[in-house]
Image (tube, coloured by chain):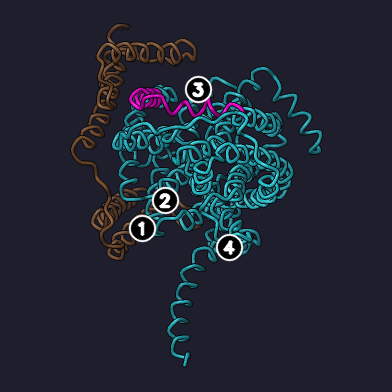
Chain colours: A cyan, B brown
Amino acid sequence: MSPLEGLAYGFSVATTPLNLFAALLGAVLGTVVGVLPGIGPVGAIALLLPITLHLGPDTALIMLAGIYYGSMYGGSTTSILVNVPGESTAVITAVEGYQMAKRGRAGAALAVAAVGSFIAGTLGVVGLMLFAPSLSDLALAFGAPEFFAIALLGLLALSRVSGGSFWQSLLVLALGLALATVGLDAISSRARYTFGLVELQQGIGLVAVVMGLYGIAEVLVVAEQAGGLPQIGRVRFRELFPTWAEWQRAMPAIIRGTGLGFFMGLIPGPSTIISTFASYNLERRLSKRREQFGQGMIEGVAGPESANNAATSGAMVPMLSLGIPFTPATAMLLAALLIQGVRPGPLLVDEYPAVFWGLIASMYIGNVALLILNFPLVGIWVSLLRIPQAILLALIVLFTLMGAYSVNNSTFDLIVLLVAGVVGYLFRKVRFDAAPLVLALVLGPLLENTFRQSLYMSRGSPLIFFERPISALILSALGLILVGPPLWRLVRRHRRPLLATRRP
Amino acid sequence: MRRAVAFAGLLGLTLGAFYLAEGLRYPLGTLAQPGPGLYPALIGALVVVGGLGTALEARHLPAGVACGWPRGPALRRVLALIAAAFAYVVVLPYVGHVIAAAPVTLTIMRVMGLRSWPKGMGLTLAMALGSYYLFAILLRVPLPGGMWTR
């Protein structure tokens, strides 16, 4: 199926009343999640995942993906208006956006953020549409060693680039891999680490763990702070139009942010966040008014807001075409498909064209809906911030508890949820990133199975990972990512005293 | 912060050692035919290394950075929320969702500053019944009915 034929088929899937409703619901929920500080897209996807068990795989993915990319739109609103990023991806938007709002240009900042998100979202889907099938074709030649190398790259590269300390990330990652071994061994069917509990034989519930780490933990943090409601100014519709000069400055930043964001989405790591910082730095470097950054530069809103939207599309490429997620949000999308019996990977486009092309088409529709939702209707979303925290938290906790229960109808999952919630809260306190644990829990079984299959294939020779060109290339890249930065720091540390002694 | 991170590292190390010891009870097999214990042994070693690295690295963390542990009313709010959620899990199989949900939502709203009892009771009832309607009736999730269904 050519991309155009696929897209036409995708629109026939995405425009059924149920799928159209799912795309719009996902876009609305994503915007709400983005606007409200607290529960993020990962927690929201985990919260809604049990509901999708009653839907088909195409409808489920369309709705959950809508939450993922929709949250990127909503995140900028509170950043610009009240200097409170609704999402971590909108932190950088608060720098320039809030300064613009203070100068009376809130409407222009909101409009550029929404239009930039729309352009990046739409172009990102074009990239996804063209890249994913090509990567799938390439991945058909992959065997166990290649998949092992990619999974290892995804996990270890995340621990290198996720921002915290390498050792802390490694510890969290290893704990996630350890948790993933709980249950029946896929090859020998032997029960491992179950301690006689029948509930542990199926393994630790991913949804419960993610809801705990991202939902309950966030609720505990909000409950601890219990701040008052932010003061929100009014934004009139006629103020939502940037001047011609502002458009001229914003458009190149939007295009640059889109390209940068999409390609950063393809590589392992928290791409939606990193791409915003990379885009902001790029705009500052390219600007002739570099010194004015931090005082309300429209490029500093346009670039990062476009980058995080494009990164969501980029991040879906490895998840859909290899079945390997590089971010917690795409890991949840993968989990949603696995629960439905659909295994993403090289055969997804051929075996489940309705899922793949339906998602692509729905993302075009979703991005148009999000532009309408976030541009003229911005005032409605801002008013969500006026909901009392007491009611909001009670609702989130109740729905989290019921959502976790409904996956397996198990009270044991509720215990897992609450323990994960407390652990997630403690992680926040000691500044540990939970993302490596989630990815390890998802990729752990794949890593173990491909590792053991590779050893079976090579009759016990670990050299198989280096004898096959693709896995050797991936592992070399991984080695570079792991060893490169500390080696570079070492070289710089030794060069400095050397240069100091040479100076007269 | 230094002490908390060092403690987290040592806790990780202990968990890793326990995991490794437990994993060594499963057959390791050979490299040509790896058993169910080989991979856990490698992962256990990785947890131990990660824990040790974290604990040692804690010494080099900047001094004076606090974890910001909650105290006073903030601590009470966090503990009340955890206790309310655990209470839901404990009583759910015995009393069913609607009755188990009521104290949780009411406790959370009260500790988060909702002062009016009638408003709190009304909202609690609406949330408990509304969530029951959504999950049990619309989504057909078999929620435990507790002693009322026995």
Element class at badge 4: helix
Gap between marks 2 and 3 measured at Cα: 29 Å
Work out whether mark 2 precedes mark 4 in sequence or the reverse, and give the earlier one. 2
- Residue A7's place in the image compared with A493, above or below, is above
Element class at badge 2: helix
Q: Viewer-proximal residue, A51 or A234?
A: A234
The residue beneath circle 1 is B50
Element class at badge 3: helix
Point out residue A253 in the picture as x, y percentages from the top left corner.
65, 50
- Are labels 4 and 1 assigned to the same chain? no
State which quadrant residue B127 falls in: top left
The residue beneath circle 2 is A173
Specify the principal SS of the magenta part: helix
- Residue B77's place in the image compared with A83, above or below, is above
Element class at badge 1: helix
Q: Amino acid at mark 3?
A: Ile
Q: Amino acid at mark 4?
A: Ala
Gap between marks 2 and 4 measured at Cα: 19 Å
Q: Viewer-proximal residue, A297 or A163?
A: A297
- Are labels 2 and 3 assigned to the same chain? yes
The answer to whether the residues at label 1 and label 2 have Cβ atoms under 8 Å apart is: yes
Q: Which mark is residue A477?
A: 4
Q: Which residues are magenta?
A: A376-400
Q: Is residue A453 left or right of residue B23?
A: right
